[in-house]
Amino acid sequence: MSPPHSPTSSTTPAPASNGASTPPHGIPDSYRAPLSLGFEALPGDKRTHEDLIVAMESCVMTFLAAPICSEREPATLANQSLEQLQSPLEYDSLAIRSPDYISATVPTIEHHFNETSIKNQELRLKANLHLKRLFNWVGHLAAPSILLSLPTCPSVIPEFARALNAALPLVPYSTIWIRAPLAEESWPKWNLLRSLMGQSVKLHLALVVGPDLPMGPNENVLANGTHEDLVLVPGSSHTMEPAWARWLAEPVASLILPADSFLTNKKGFPVLSKRHQQLVRTFLPREPYVLITPTGTSSSSSSPSSTSLSQADMSKYAEYIKYLHRTLPKTSIRDRFANGYMDYLQAPLQPLMDHLEAQTYDVFERDPVKYRKYTAAVAECLRDRTKTLAAAEMIKPQLVMVVGAGPRGPLVDCVLKGAQQAKVNVKVIAVEKNPNALVSLKRKQKEQWGEALVEVVYADMRQWKPKEKCDILVSELLGSFGDNELSPECLDGVQHVLKDDGVSIPQSYTPYLAPVSSSKLYSEASKLKTPGSLETSYVVMIRNAWLTSPVQPLWTFSHPAPALLPDNLHNERYATVTFDIGAQPALIHGFAGYFECVLYGGVTMSTRPDNHTPDMTSWFPIYFPIRHPMHVPAGSKVGVHVWRVTGAHKVWYEWAMVKPDTMAVPAAGFGSLIHNVGGKSHWIGL
């Protein structure tokens, strides 16, 4: 199960290691995501393409957006015949005339889809021919991206979407940036467009951050400039305003900053308001192309007007954006660990079927926070147990068994450190079924621990029959969803080695779930193009997403288990939870899963986004997609059903989403299908 060499090179989900793949090593805490900064030349700008490139380089920018047509191209189609629009473009009508510098250029296209053209057959045909002709030229140039404006009228969007679909084959190397203002009314239009285009992965957003930022109906600006009801940004400890959060779920390729969105400080330099700064700082780590455009976007238009910026002004705007980028908060330990693997789908482990490789062990054994937690739990447990022992009994060491010790035995180290902190003598037995891991484990026993203190046993914990029972049983078998790597089944199989008053570390764990909106996650699962790709759970460091509701618990596993039933039936679970969507409509693409664990007493670990153990890196969240994204209106509720099902040789999850009034008996048209029925697409082998 070798981790992938590149997050973008594989067409199948890569194997994970305890909820995470192998990220790059040695990324400094001063690391910043690269900044792509450019400016937009508007229609009427008389500079040549070469002149614009020179201006871009003189401002130390990295790209520009410019009209593909010169001012000689007619602004309307009324005076152009159908024959003219079917003929090749004239050289003089083009502003971008060759592939020179095209890698640093985003061509902008003024389309002619509006309320008038869709009602007039001739104008509608002309608008389609005009778009195809320009797309054909862009495809010839192999431009990486194309910028078009989202129609302002919803009734125009179906025809615009159909025309785009027809023109996409002409630009095989280009992504489509749709310019849309960051406004309340924009999202339904954008959602309609991408739905009509089948969630196309070539479709991206260019968000125009105008002078007036949207504010949700439940948001209140406090005296210190902060806001009530802030929501968490996935994959971080930062928060943002609810009215902005849903845009994190969209494929935002570019942030467009009009000149009139800036204020002027006392020294005459452009600056952004605190709210604008917060928004831009939230998006910058996601590496959007930041585009400075001369004028703003009104609420009724998503296209800029025709003024221009001087070279000196462009430099000032560029310097300010670079300042915001330089002063971003330091990259967190978790972000450095996950660098290169954000939103990258990975297959969960098959811990009982497969022997893990050294590289996989290396990933989850490089988490000092997790092992400090285990050390604290062992120390607290030993202190509690020795409080009740008689003086004669304290002479005998506490017997601690570590099951699934791995090649380096980090849990053995935790037990020995915890015993030292508690000032309690222990005897440790380390059990490992992987013959390859056993080689390194025995070497560490010989060179560091000593055979008198630590005994190493080669066995499957479920079949192992020790000579005596232990006081404490320690394991690290948790997956991204808590129980998804068969921790319940493994610990059930080994709890016969535990004394009647013995303690399991961990003592319990609970999976949590929340609806997630994420075009990125859904498109990544969709493009795998396997029959079960949208009915399979994935380990993934979720970033470009919006959790539409706070997480809720599903069920809890406790150890030792109070009673074991035949055929593993005691480990089946079923939960149904209802989520309030809130004031923003959403497109639900599935569910994000997390877990919380009680190691012992008050020592806990959590991957919940609202309560994540600081700097812990061992687990990424888990993603359960739904085959067909579901639009949920503002102020509504959604119900989620989740099953953990056990069989003779496997365990699997099934899940479905329904409306709350049909949660008892799902009705046709009111819910998703039940995904992964019978474990047909994904299961974990016993």
Image (cartoon, rainbow, N blue to C red):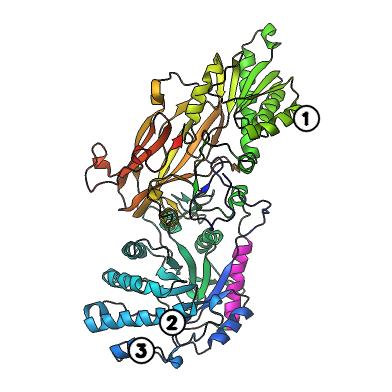
Q: In the rendered view, does 359 fall on the left or right side of 115?
A: right
Do the CB atoms of the residues marked 2 and 3 lie less than 8 Å apart? no
Q: Residues within 10 Å of mark 1 (few under 14, many from 20)?
A: few
Residue tagged by mark 3?
A: 87
Q: Residue at x 55, y 23 (%)?
A: 504
Span colored in magenta: 311-327
Residue 187 image point, x, y percent:
36, 62
Q: Residue at x 69, y 15 (%)?
A: 397
Q: Quadrant of the N terminus?
A: top right
Q: Which image quadrant is residue 395 in?
A: top right
Front-lying residue, 505 or 268: 505
Tag 1 secondary structure: helix
Q: Which image quadrant is residue 586 in?
A: bottom left
Residue tagged by mark 1?
A: 447
Residue 508 image point, x, y percent:
50, 28
User: From this viewpoint, is residue 268 visible?
Assistant: no
Outermost residue toward the front in this view: 435
Residue 320 on the magenta segment: yes
